[in-house]
Image (cartoon, rainbow, N blue to C red):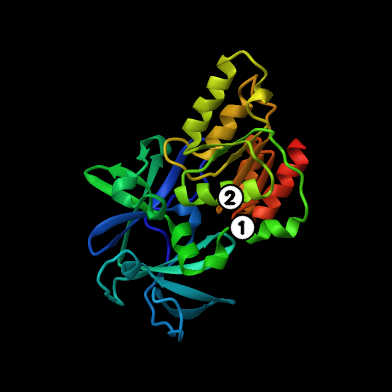
Amino acid sequence: MPMPNKKKEILLESGTNELEVLEFTIEGKHYGINVAKILELMRYMEVVPMPNSNPFVKGIFKHRESVLTVINLPAYLGHAEKADADQDIFIVTNFNKTLSAFHVHTVEEIHRISWSKIEKPDPAIYGGVDGLATGIARVGEKLITIVDFERILSDISPTQGIQLTDIDKLGARSRSDKPILIAEDSLMLEKVLVECLTKAEYTNITMTTNGREAWERLQSYKATGEPIENFVRLVITDIEMPQMDGHHLVKLIRSDPVLSHLPVVVFSSLISPEMRIKGKEIGATAQVSKPEINDLVRIIDETII
């Protein structure tokens, strides 16, 4: 099933601070997912239930050479269960190196939106660390809630997320106070990242919630007139973030004479062969797919020690 109103070009130009959002509905409410996470759209089909599975797992079905798990997104988001074979859709996703299918009621259209127009949800309203919204986009008169699909997948299958215990596999380590600046919008992942890097003996970590905040922090370091290395030796950034995405942040750093030499590692669930091309074009030092925390730590070791 083709994507609605989708242009032929799949990838946006690198570093434009834009994304394409597929709008879908559940019980008439408007939600969104980054098109970069979508493999394809499929008509609703019957699936095989799995005994003793997570209550939000609808079942499984054969998809070409793979067996896909179908996640009951209406139920997960607290909506009434409904299945209309003539209208309902499976959104087949590919992120975190995992193929999954999410059941939704309808798909509407694709919107090209600047990250600067996407607002971070109020934690008091959207659940703080446990919240399921990564951003709110206004399109005309509609408010589209961009759903944290990574959070859902990690909740349903915890082994798909970053594992603190993986750090133990790295063996004995030496403490380092070399400063690291991180841009990550997910409060849950921020907490996990700090725990993992602290366990890996990196003790000087500054967190920012999006690319714009990280960029403003870098500018404030420059304004002191001191060597930039006194404040930051390495930047780690997610790609998907409200206000400014990670690719645009990398592009700004590479265009700044004072900052351009800084190593910048992209740490994202969206890393794919196509995304690696984009990251290389804008000058990323390295690109690591979530949840490979050990690979991230090894690159930090190689880069700043």
User: Number of callouts in the render?
Assistant: 2
Using the numbered discs, state the Cα–Cα distance from disc 2 to disc 1 in whole angstroms: 7 Å
The vertical placement of 23 against 99, above or below, is above
Q: Residue at x 47, y 38 (%)?
A: 210
Residue 278: percent from the left, percent from the top? 61, 43
Residue farthest toward the top in the current orientation of the protein = 225
Q: Helix, strand, or loop for circle 1?
A: helix
Q: Amino acid at mark 2?
A: Glu
Q: In the figure, residue 76 lies in which quadrant?
A: bottom left
Dot 2 crowding, Cα within 10 Å, few <14, some 14–19, many 20+: some
Dot 1 crowding, Cα within 10 Å, few <14, some 14–19, many 20+: some
* Front in this rendered view, residue 52 or 169: 169
Q: Residue at x 61, y 24 (%)?
A: 255
Label drawn at residue 80:
none
**The N terminus sits in image quarter:** bottom left
The vertical placement of 213 against 68, above or below, is above
The vertical placement of 290 against 27, above or below, is above
* Front in this rendered view, residue 162 or 85: 162
Sequence-first disc among 2 and 1: 1
Q: Residue at x 59, y 54 (%)?
A: 290
Is 152 displayed left or right of 199 in the figure? left
Q: Identify residue for label 1.
A: 164
The answer, for residue 10, to whether it is visible in the render is no
Q: Identify residue for label 2.
A: 195
Q: Helix, strand, or loop for circle 2?
A: helix
Residue 259: percent from the left, percent from the top? 64, 24
The answer, for residue 201, to whether it is visible in the render is yes
Q: Amino acid at mark 1?
A: Leu
**The C terminus sits in image quarter:** top right
Kindly indicate whether the residue at mark 1 contacts the one at mark 2 (C-beta within 8 angstroms): yes
